[in-house]
Amino acid sequence: MCQAGEDYAGPARREPPPVPRPSREQKCVKCAEGLPVVVIRAGDAFCRVCFKAFYVHKFRAMLGKNRVIFPGEKVLLSWSGGPSSSSMVWQVLEGLSQDSAKRLRFVPGVIYVDEGAACGQSLEDRQKTVAEVKRILENTGFPWHVVALEEVFSLPPSVLCCTSQESAGTEEAYKAAVDRFLQQQQQQQQRVLGAEAGASPAQGEARLHPSHGREPSGTAGYPTAAQTEALSRLFSSIKTLTAKEELLQTLRTHLIVHIARVHGYCKVMTGETCTRLAIKLMTNLALGRGAFLAWDTGFSDERHGDVVLVRPMRDHTLKEVAFYNHLFRVPSVFTPAIDTKAPEKASIHRLMEAFILRLQTLFPSTVSTVYRTSEKLVKAPREGCAAGPSGPSCLLCMCALDIDTADAEC
């Protein structure tokens, strides 16, 4: 019999399945003993200890698998203050500690680029952000450099030239570098033990385990008003947010590479995760940069010659980074970006980010599928194009120009 107020419009809508949460009966999938505190994927619940081991192993495995960074090399960590780059700096900090099982063998430094002028921040807000940044960097004990984006106007013309570097990425060269590094450590310890008789115990311990002292930073004070005005006019003259984001990324990269060259760093680490790289891959395809996806999303980027960009966080997802930073209290600094509060369709970058993240919500394997596709890309020039260091390259992105110089000369 019909009931008053009964709805016959159609079948009831199905609600999405509830997100699995750790229960008291559920155990860690790794050790099967601890209580889970993190659910990375459906059925993958980790306790605190196992999640940290899982997270650290990803970072170490990425460095060990590629072997691009040789022992004793100076590596510049590009830190934006965000979650991913903060987690990267924290991984390096813990990897260099005395308690680490396998200590990292490179010499790190940190750089922070103040982009407040391009994002429309006031001078007072920029000063507050830089003060907070310096406080965090001083606690790391690493050499640090805080530079303003306005310094791109004072870069030398040589920054647009690709400085060639001999390839030393063979297995034999890496093993030889490890042997030299171990020999230097043994000689240093022998000198310390020999001089320990005439020194106090505290001095001997300091020599045996030297801390990473902070060298004079690359901070040159705040930029002049003329430089800030010039940078503001430059970004104001660009009409689309897509072009502004591309220009900001290009200027930032040139500035970081220049600072690395000046201070003797041969590698630059960036904190791009696999989620960010999946978005970047789709964005670059939409922008017509498909020919250089292997450089833009791969582990290493050798376009600048003597300074190589590496991405050790490319196996981590944004979700894993957020959980790790929350559980282990990784410090970070919030700074508004150029696309903060921008609508979804304001730029190709924002549109592709919303598209990928929405797909990831409905289909959890979206990011991993796009990311694994990027791993199959090979760094090979197109036939008929000028390739190699002697060929013409773009002054902005340093990629080889996709033109045939023989036809152009004719």
Image (cartoon, rainbow, N blue to C red):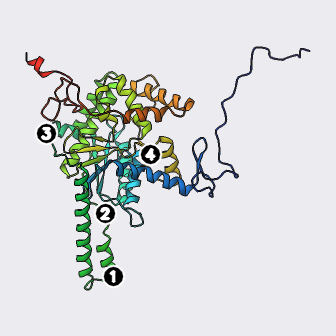
Residue drawn at x 43%, y 31% is: 370
Q: Say what amino acid the circle numbered 3 marks.
A: Ser
Q: Quadrant of residue 188?
A: bottom left
The residue identified by callout 2 is 212
- Residue underneath mark 3: 158
Q: Earlier in the sequence, mark 4 or mark 2?
A: 4
Q: Quadrant of the C terminus?
A: top left
- Is label 3 in a helix, a strand or a loop? helix
- The answer to whether 42 appears left or right of 382 in the picture is right
- The residue beneath circle 1 is 201
Question: Which quadrant would residue 334 be assigned to in this image?
Answer: top left
Element on which disc 1 rests: helix
Amino acid type of the residue tagged 2 in the rendering: His
Which comes sooner in the sequence, label 2 or label 3? 3
First in sequence, mark 2 or 1: give its number. Answer: 1
Q: CA distance from mark 4 to mark 2?
A: 23 Å
